């Protein structure tokens, strides 16, 4: 018994000692990171000149232009940035510098420089600006944001509320990675594409935008971009753009080349539990191809409507946002493997990625084949009462409580495909193999794909 008590006492002592020692490396690490990153972070002040027209201007400008012309108003914005190259290249947010007529950069030692914008990605809200330094700069080390784990310690660095203009050195706050792969509604942020963000509870406030989110190794893993707050200050809901998403903008700036984005010419939808069940997946994942641009890269490679894209360029595709991001990151002209599921069969195709902006087709203007009609007046498939119409095969009625109703099919839907077979008339539907209409079926309408479970 005495031996057991002694063993327990030693175990508890070791446990508490372990906790004590665990605090020392974290504190040491934060101090070390602070010392390493502070000279790589800058404060940014942007000046925007706005023309202001008063009622008097509009009434009397034609008569007295010298007296009632438009006046101007100056607006100053604050933000942060991180030095990425010793020649004076600085990474920040587009919204910090985009509309500015003059950009002033303040280093941690208090020295000031005027900057110019050299590369911009509006949708991703990233920009690279450049100063002409008269001193040696300290670029930050960039990490790998794909390896970021939920729960790891991070530091947010920047110029909250402009305090760095008074003390020169940036502010640092500590927290953890609260979540990854977060998205923010584009409608709330003027059309910007805030996807795959890193969420942190490290305090981020107005003025931190453009500053780095740093791991405990001192490497930049993200660029602070937004907060969600009811008060205007940090409430522990901060977001950063993964640094890997910024690498293309950085390369564009350093190499002096225009920024290009990949494009394959497909439209898709996320996989619902019903679609998951139809394809026999272990969980909802991938992108179901709703339409393919004729003659586009995907079409040339053999991708079809109804195919399920599971992997792109050796990366697992979780949803539409993943696919858009993966395609955009590939340089036009690159041939990449794309794994799809067609029915129950997996296929890998080679797709030569095109350039976004070239070959776009408005699919809403695509030609609709007109049904020729036939002897059959209607067909009932899983509760869909189908008839011929000038637009094609139309759902005339949906039987209440039927599998079709439960799937979301609605009266008036135009059916384009059943189980990936094109149907342009009732004759096409009637000609489908009987075994294909048994069990679960995949129906493509103009509104998208629906899985009708038997």
Image: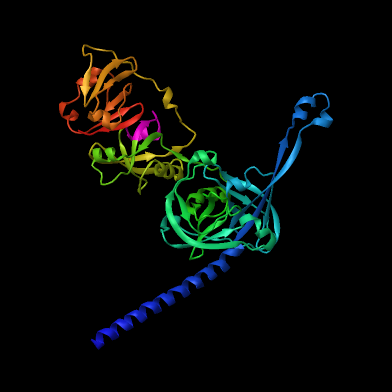
Q: Nearer the viewer, residue 98 or 188?
A: 188
Residue 423 is covered by the magenta coloring: no
Residue sitting at 19 percent across and 29 percent down?
436
Q: Is residue 167 above or below residue 252?
A: below
Residue 269, located in which quarter of the rendered image?
top left
Q: Is residue 453 above or below residue 159?
A: above
Residue 386: x, y in percent?
26, 20
Q: Is residue 163 above or below residue 186?
A: below
Residue 312: x, y in percent?
36, 44
Residue sitting at 43 percent across and 77 percent down?
21
Q: Nearer the viewer, residue 336 or 17?
A: 17
Q: How many marks?
A: 0
Q: Is residue 220 above or below residue 378?
A: below
Q: Is residue 281 left or right of residue 69?
A: left
Residue 294 is covered by the magenta coloring: yes
Stretch of the chain drawn in magenta: 289-304
Q: Nearer the viewer, residue 7 or 25?
A: 7
Q: Nearer the viewer, residue 145 or 64?
A: 64
For the question of whether residue 219 can be seen, the reply is no
Residue 44: x, y in percent?
65, 53
């Amino acid at each position: 018994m005495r031996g057991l008590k002694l063993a327990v006492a030693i175990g508890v002592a070791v446990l508490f000692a372990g906790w004590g020692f665990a605090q020392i490396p974290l504190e040491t690490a934060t101090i070390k990171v602070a010392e390493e990153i502070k000279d790589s972070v800058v404060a940014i002040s942007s000046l925007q000149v706005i023309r202001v027209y008063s009622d008097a201007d509009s009434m009397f400008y034609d008569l007295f232009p010298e007296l009632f012309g438009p006046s101007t108003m100056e607006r100053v914005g604050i933000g942060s940035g991180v030095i990425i190259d010793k020649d004076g290249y600085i990474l920040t947010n587009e919204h910090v510098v985009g509309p500015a007529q003059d950009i002033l950069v303040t280093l941690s030692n208090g020295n000031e420089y005027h900057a110019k914008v050299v590369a911009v990605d509006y949708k991703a809200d990233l920009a690279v600006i450049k100063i002409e330094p008269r001193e040696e700069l300290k670029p930050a080390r960039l990490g790998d944001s794909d390896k970021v784990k939920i729960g790891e310690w991070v530091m947010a660095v920047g110029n909250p509320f402009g305090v760095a203009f008074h003390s020169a050195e940036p502010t640092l706050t500590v927290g953890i990675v609260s979540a990854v792969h977060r998205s923010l509604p584009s409608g709330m942020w003027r059309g910007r594409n805030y996807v795959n963000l890193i969420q942190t509870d490290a305090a981020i406030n107005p003025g931190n935008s453009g500053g780095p989110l740093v791991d405990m190794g001192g490497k930049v893993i993200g660029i602070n971009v937004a907060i969600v707050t009811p008060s205007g200050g940090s409430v522990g809901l901060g977001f950063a753009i993964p640094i890997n998403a910024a690498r293309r903008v950085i390369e564009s700036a350093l190499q002096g080349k225009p920024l290009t984005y990949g494009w394959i010419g497909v439209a898709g939808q996320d996989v619902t539990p019903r679609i998951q069940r139809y394809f026999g997946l272990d969980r909802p994942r991938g992108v179901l191809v709703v339409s393919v641009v004729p003659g586009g890269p995907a079409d040339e490679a053999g991708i079809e409507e109804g195919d399920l894209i599971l992997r792109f360029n050796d990366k697992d595709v979780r949803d539409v946002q993943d696919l858009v991001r993966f395609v955009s990151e590939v340089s036009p002209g690159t041939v990449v493997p794309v794994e799809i599921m067609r029915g129950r069969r997996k296929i890998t195709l080679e797709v030569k990625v095109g350039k976004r902006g070239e070959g776009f087709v408005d699919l809403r203007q695509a030609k609709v084949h007109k049904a020729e009609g036939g002897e059959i007046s209607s067909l009932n498939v899983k509760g869909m009462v189908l008839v011929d119409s000038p637009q094609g095969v139309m759902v005339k009625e949906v039987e209440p409580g039927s599998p079709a109703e439960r799937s979301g099919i609605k009266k008036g839907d135009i059916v384009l495909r059943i189980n990936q077979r094109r149907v342009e008339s009732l004759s096409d539907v009637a000609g489908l193999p009987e075994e294909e209409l048994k069990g679960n079926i995949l129906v493509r309408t103009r509104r998208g794909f629906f899985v009708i479970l038997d």
